[in-house]
Image: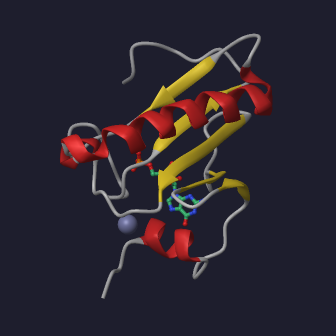
C-alpha cells in the first residue's frame, strides 16, 4: 500500500485547494503557507525526490518547471518574481518524500536559507 500523502492528494483521496491539474501533474496551495503565495507543484508519478530522478524523467521535469513559472505568473508573481524551491532529503529538510516544487512569493524572501 502506498502511504504517500501527495500520491493520495493526486488521487483525490485527500482533499486539497487545487490550482492546476493535467494528466501528469497537480498544483495546490500549501496547507501551511510561508508567504502570501505558496503552492506546490507535484508530478502524479511517485518520485521520492529530485535525487531519485532518472534520465527518463527529463521531459517531465522540464514540463514541471515550465508549468511552475506559468502558474507563478498567473498567481501574481510575474512582476516582482518569487522563489522556486525543491527540498531534498535530510539536510534539505524535505518532509514529504514525493517530489514537489514550492512556488513562493508575494513578499521579499530572505536569503540565505537558515
Ligand atoms: P517539504 O518540507 O517536504 O519541502 O514540503 C512539504 C510541504 O507540504 C510543506 O510546506 C507542508 O506544509 C506541505 N504539506 C504537508 N502535508 C500537506 C497536506 O496534506 N496538504 C497540503 N496542501 N500541503 C501539505
Ligand atoms: Zn507519492
| Vertical order, 2 against 62 (above or below) | below
| Vertical order, 71 against 76 (above or below) | below
Residue at left offset 57%, top offset 82%: 13
Please give left or right for residue 55 compared with residue 10 in the image: left
In the depicted view, which residue is nearer to us: 24 or 9?
A: 24
The image quadrant of residue 33 is: top right
Residue at left offset 30%, top offset 46%: 57
Please give left or right for residue 33 compared with residue 78 in the image: left
Residue 88 in the image, given as x and y percentages of width and height? 27, 41
Quarter of the figure that contains the C terminus? top left
Residue 100 in the image, given as x and y percentages of width and height? 44, 47
| Vertical order, 68 against 12 (above or below) | above
Quarter of the figure that contains the N terminus? bottom left
- Which color scheme does this rendered protein use? secondary structure
Please give left or right for residue 17 compared with residue 42 in the image: right
Residue 109 in the image, given as x and y percentages of width and height? 58, 18
Amino acid at each position: 500500500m502506498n502511504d504517500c500523502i501527495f500520491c493520495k492528494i493526486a488521487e483525490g483521496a485527500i482533499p486539497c485547494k487545487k490550482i492546476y491539474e493535467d494528466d501528469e501533474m497537480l498544483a495546490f496551495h500549501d496547507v501551511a503557507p510561508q508567504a502570501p503565495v505558496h503552492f506546490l507543484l507535484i508530478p502524479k508519478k511517485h518520485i521520492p525526490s529530485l535525487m531519485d530522478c532518472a534520465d527518463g524523467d527529463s521531459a517531465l521535469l522540464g514540463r514541471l518547471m515550465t508549468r511552475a513559472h506559468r502558474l507563478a505568473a498567473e498567481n501574481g508573481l510575474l512582476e516582482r518574481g518569487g522563489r522556486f524551491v525543491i527540498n531534498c532529503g535530510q539536510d534539505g529538510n524535505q518532509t514529504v518524500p514525493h517530489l514537489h516544487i514550492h512556488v513562493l512569493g508575494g513578499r521579499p524572501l530572505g536569503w540565505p536559507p537558515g
